[in-house]
């Protein structure tokens, strides 16, 4: 019999960090603020309704600017994880600059919890130093690489990697390609369905990861699709876990 599937629902909590760093005009900035006003509250309500714990990759600047939103995430027992300071292109930074950014990121997030275990690179773009630097910062996992569709261990760095994909990212589907929610559902559900039927996946690597952005998925007609997907997943043998708990299963070879 196949083991259960772990589902990690992840939310990249950028708010308007991208637009602020790029000095964009107020209209563009306000689009990011939708995450604060509607996205995060609606997502928290949905997760509570379905008794699911999730992971929120949050920029340090966002935590500084919107402490109440971060507190609400933690009060609902979700995971706070790291996502740059002001959504930097890490590959454009020198080693010294990147060290400063990672230090600022950790200091901002550690004001809320010292349980920061994971990192996702803004834009999924890493420098050649990033993984080493986050390992040195004490983090246990990363979720930014594309080299597999199952989690794996970067042995030399002692990091677990949860790979990502553009088609499992709501921003690409909704905001770049302007697809309908039904298209998102069709892609995500069919990938999930295919994955649960693969019979060569080791038991503690059966992890399905979805990436969403509060400013994108937080629109009601899109959130309904995420709920439909959750309801479908619940008809299968799944458990929903924060990524730091999934990391624990992998590192300690815990059976599900
Ligand atoms: Zn982001």
Image (cartoon, rainbow, N blue to C red):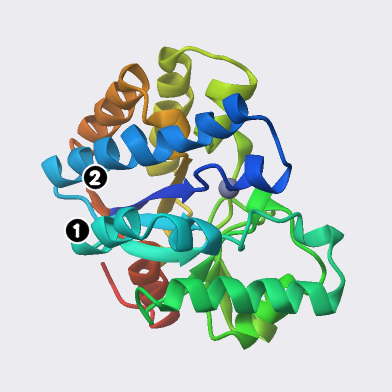
Asked if residue 60 is positioned above or below residue 99 in the image, the reply reads: above
Q: In which quarter of the image is the C terminus?
A: bottom left
Which image quarter: residue 156?
A: bottom right
Q: Specify few, some or many for label 2: CA neighbours under 10 Å numbering under 14, 14-19, or 20 or more.
A: some
Residue 154 in sight here: no
Residue under label 1, please give it: 76
Which image quarter: residue 143?
A: bottom right
- Front residue of this view, candidates 195 and 16: 16
SS for dot 1: loop
- Front residue of this view, candidates 113 and 191: 113
Q: Farthest residue to the front: give it.
A: 26
First-in-chain label (2 vs 1): 2
- The answer to whether the residues at label 2 and label 1 have Cβ atoms under 8 Å apart is yes
Query: Mark on residue 11?
Result: none
- Front residue of this view, candidates 215 and 165: 215
Asked if residue 224 is positioned above or below residue 126 in the image, the reply reads: above
Residue 110: x and y in percent read: 43, 78
Name the residue: 58% across, 55% down: 163
Q: Specify few, some or many for label 1: CA neighbours under 10 Å numbering under 14, 14-19, or 20 or more.
A: some
SS for dot 2: helix
Asked if residue 245 is positioned above or below residue 205 in the image, the reply reads: below
Q: Quadrant of the N terminus?
A: bottom left
Name the residue: 31% across, 77% down: 254
Residue 107: x and y in percent read: 52, 78
Residue under label 2, please give it: 44
Name the residue: 18% across, 40% down: 45
Residue 153: x and y in percent read: 58, 74
Residue 252: x and y in percent read: 38, 83
- Front residue of this view, candidates 115 and 157: 115
Estimate the spatial distance between the alpha carbons at disc 2 and disc 1, rounded to whole Å: 8 Å
């Amino acid at each position: 019999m196949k083991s259960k599937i772990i589902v990690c629902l992840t939310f990249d909590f950028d708010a308007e960090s991208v637009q602020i760093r790029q000095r964009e005009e107020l209209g563009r900035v306000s689009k990011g603020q939708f995450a604060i006003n509607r996205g995060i509250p609606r997502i928290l309500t949905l997760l509570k309704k379905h008794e699911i714990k999730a992971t929120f990759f949050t920029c340090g600047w966002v935590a500084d600017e919107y402490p109440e939103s971060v507190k609400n995430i933690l009060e609902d027992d979700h995971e706070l994880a790291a996502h740059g300071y002001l959504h930097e292109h890490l590959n454009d930074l020198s080693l010294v600059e990147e060290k400063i950014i990672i230090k600022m990121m950790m200091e901002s997030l550690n004001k809320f919890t010292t349980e920061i275990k994971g990192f996702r690179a803004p834009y999924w773009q890493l420098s050649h130093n990033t993984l080493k630097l986050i390992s040195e910062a004490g983090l246990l996992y990363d979720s930014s690489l594309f080299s597999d569709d199952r989690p794996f261990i970067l042995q030399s760095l002692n990091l677990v990697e949860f790979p990502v994909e553009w088609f499992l990212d709501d921003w690409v589907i909704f905001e770049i390609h302007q697809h309908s929610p039904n298209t998102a559902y069709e892609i995500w559900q069919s990938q999930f369905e295919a994955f649960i039927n693969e019979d060569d996946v080791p038991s503690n690597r059966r992890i399905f990861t979805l990436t969403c952005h509060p400013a994108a998925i937080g629109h009601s007609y899109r959130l309904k699709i995420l709920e439909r997907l959750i309801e479908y997943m619940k008809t299968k043998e799944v458990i929903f876990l924060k990524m730091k708990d999934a990391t624990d299963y992998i590192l300690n070879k815990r059976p599900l």
